[in-house]
Image (cartoon, grey):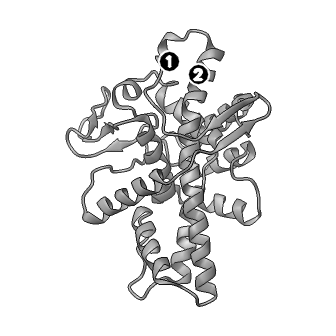
Amino acid sequence: MRNKLVLTVVSAGIVTAIAFWQSEQSEIEPVVIQDEQREVLVQAHSIDTAPDFASINDIQQKKTAFFDYLKPGIALENKRILKERARLEQIQAHFNNNELTSEDGSYAERLGQLYQVEVPSEGINAKWIDMMLHRVDVLPEALVLTQAAKESGWGTSRFATQANNYFGQWCYSSGCGVVPEQRKEGMTHEVASFSSVQESIHRYFMNVNRNRAYQDLRNIRFDLHSNNLDLLDTDSAIELANGLIRYSERGQPYVDEIQSMIRFNQPFWTK
């Protein structure tokens, strides 16, 4: 199956990282994104309880309800990351000019814990900055929404409705989630339970941005960013999907299906 994020908190460092994320979230101001094609507004905010998607029989209405429900939560994650990225680039500029401050060091320590790239004992260096620039960056809503639709059965799966899990993330401690009905003999994983759908979105972002299984995606994104291309548009979503070959045991057919869904549902995307 998929390479999943282990969700058990096992160290004080991770606790600190979670606290840092929570403080970052609390400081985020709402951002409004204009969707000119559909003439709607997407406002970034933490999303509430999901609608009963299974009760919506019309396919187009179900898609609209599903995407509109998740978009604000995705926008919130990208807003957080843009703030982190801006501060990281400021640290990079200070490093290049030999102007690092103690505040830079403190922020780097906390951000490094969140993204699992510890600052070296001798302090911030070029390698650390490069690794962080590969990890601290946005994901296009078209990619996130498509994977959510695929992994949650458009919000109707048992894992989505019972565990707020829209991306199929696994966990490995007993009782951490929902036991899959078709779990193979000898396997011990569960499908992780989350306190909210917003937490599921956040964990998905951190999984893609930290897990070594998705290094290819991060390399593709880094190249797109270096060429000043829009990371949030549909073309980037299709390109980044090539880095998800290890998300499913199906490999390339899974990637092909995600890319096909992105193209087919393009009228629903904000960009």
Neighbourhood count class around disc 1 (C-alpha, 10 Å): few under 14, some 14–19, many 20 upward: some
For mark 2, does the 10 Å Cα neighbourhood hold few (<14), some (14 to 19), or many (20 or more) residues? some
N-terminal-most mark, 1 or 2: 1
Q: Nearer the viewer, residue 64 or 255?
A: 64
Residue 39 drawn at (x, y percent)? 76, 28
Q: Against 235, is 211 above or below?
A: below
Q: Which amino acid lies under the numbered mark 1 shown in the image of this protein? A: Phe
Residue 234, horizontal then vertical, whole percent: 72, 42
Q: Secondary structure at mark 1?
A: helix
User: In which image quadrant can residue 256 be found?
Assistant: top right
> At 65% from the left edge and 63% from the top edge, which residue is drawn?
222
Residue at label 1? 53
Percent position of residue 186, x then y: 23, 40
The reply, left or right, for residue 237 in relation to residue 178 is right
Q: Secondary structure at mark 2?
A: helix
Most extreme residue toward the right, as rendered? 37
- 59 or 19, nearer to the observer: 19
Is residue 72 shown left or right of residue 168? right
Q: Is residue 8 visible?
A: yes
- The one of 133 and 31 positioned closer to us in this rendering: 31
Q: Amino acid at mark 2?
A: Ala
Residue at image point 29% right, 59% down: 15
Name the mark on residue 65. Answer: 2
Q: Quarter-wise, where is residue 134 in the image?
A: bottom right
Determine contact: label 1, label 2, CB under 8 Å. yes
